[in-house]
Structures are given as structure tokens and as C-alpha cells.
Image: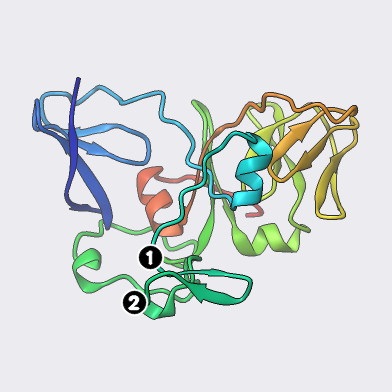
Amino acid sequence: MHHFNNVGLYDALFVMQDTETKTLWRHIDGQALYGPMVGHHLGPVGNLLQMNVAQALAADPKTRVAISDRPYVAGGKQLGTRASLPGGARGAPAENAQLMDFFVQTLGKEDTRRPRMELGLGIWTPKTRRYYPVTVIRERGRAFMDRIDGNPETNNPAALFVNAKTAKIEGGEVHLDNGSVVRSGVLLDRNGKPQNADRPQQMFTRWYGFALTFLSCEVFGE
């Protein structure tokens, strides 16, 4: 059993340390960076998928929903305790955000192929590290097919493996050419029955963090 705390920054990303061995760990892929546990990984690391309440309930109707007293926006109105949020945040990451100076001071040599603070979906498998910029996702119509390690994959700000060749948006749903549908992030067969979805490791993140974690990663569309 290990217990973890955030203890600092490296490459402008938070670093964890376990209290038992004092090893420093990278939070994205669970790799030991420094200390007696170097060579080990925490894992398999689960996917942290960003979703709204409707999507969470579609995935599991028994999901319990907890509403914080912190400010949030629903129905165009701000609810909860009033407080000042950086940059007027409304829950979504600002596309024009800037790194604070004390984050920048920890950055290593950056990959300048994309803007530092660009948002996108980064995925990784034992063979592939690939970044999908949000701008490219939007240009492709929000649902499209790509191949990862020889397997087809559909991306709708989150990625999953499917046995299909094409995808298109109809009524807010992703329709695959094999008859399956992705509705609110849930994969359904042609009869509407929910299916267990196999997903690559992924994270919706800023470009600099993914590029510094996975050096020389692929950029979709380039």
C-alpha cells in the first residue's frame, strides 16, 4: 500500500510522491521519475474521461451525482456559492489560458510543433503516442475514424476502439457503418444494447504536457 501527495512541478506538470519510499511519480502515465522505485509504473492507469451528468447517467443509470457548493453554470445561470474564479472560468478550460511564471520555470525543452497551451486529446498505447488537436477534431466534423496499432478507432473528444471503417454524426449521435451507435459516450450495438467499450489510454490535455511526457509523439493530420 502506498499513499501519495502532490509535492511539486516538473515540466509544468504536477508530480506525486509516495510517503513510503519517497519516490517521485508522473501522474499522466504513472511512471516513477526519481527514487528507489524507478523502473516501476503505477498501473494500469485508468482513463479519466470528462463528461456531463447526462453522459454519466447514460453510461450507468445508478451513478450518484454530487453537486458541490462551488460555483457552476446550469441553464445559463451561475449557481452555488459565489466566488472569483481565475479568468472567469465556467468549468471549461480557457483556450487562451497562459501558464503562470512558476510553472514556466520548470519547463524542459518544449516541442514547438503546436502552441504550448493548445487543447487536444492525447492517446497512448504500447506502440503509439498520438495527439489530436481540438481544432483538427472540429475540422473533421467531430466524429471520424483513425487507425491505432492496426485497430480502427473513433474519436468524439474521447476515443474508443470499434470494428468499423466510417463514422458520421446524426442527431448528436455517432453512427458507425457496422450499425453501432455511440450515444452520450456509450457504445450501443445495432439493437441498442450497451456494449463494453475498449479504450486506449487517453487524456484531454494541453499540448505542452502531452508532448513533454511523450517525446516526439505523433500529431494527427501532420
Element marked by disc 1:
loop
Q: Is residue 51 above or below residue 35?
A: below
Where residue 211 appears, as percent x and y from the top left, is 42, 51
Horizontal side of 158 relative to 138 (left or right) equals left
Q: Which residue is mark 1?
A: 70
Front-most of residues 173 and 110: 173
Kindly identify the residue that appears in the image at 81 percent across and 26 percent down.
193
Kindly identify the residue that appears in the image at 37 percent across and 24 percent down.
43
Q: Amino acid at mark 1?
A: Arg
Q: Amino acid at mark 2?
A: Ala
**Residue 83 bears which disc, if any?**
2
Where residue 46 appears, as percent x and y from the top left, is 45, 31
Kindly identify the residue that appears in the image at 74 percent across and 56 percent down.
142
Where residue 97 appears, as percent x and y from the top left, is 41, 74
Residue 158, image quadrant: top right
Front-most of residues 14 and 218: 14
C-alpha span from label 1 to label 2: 8 Å
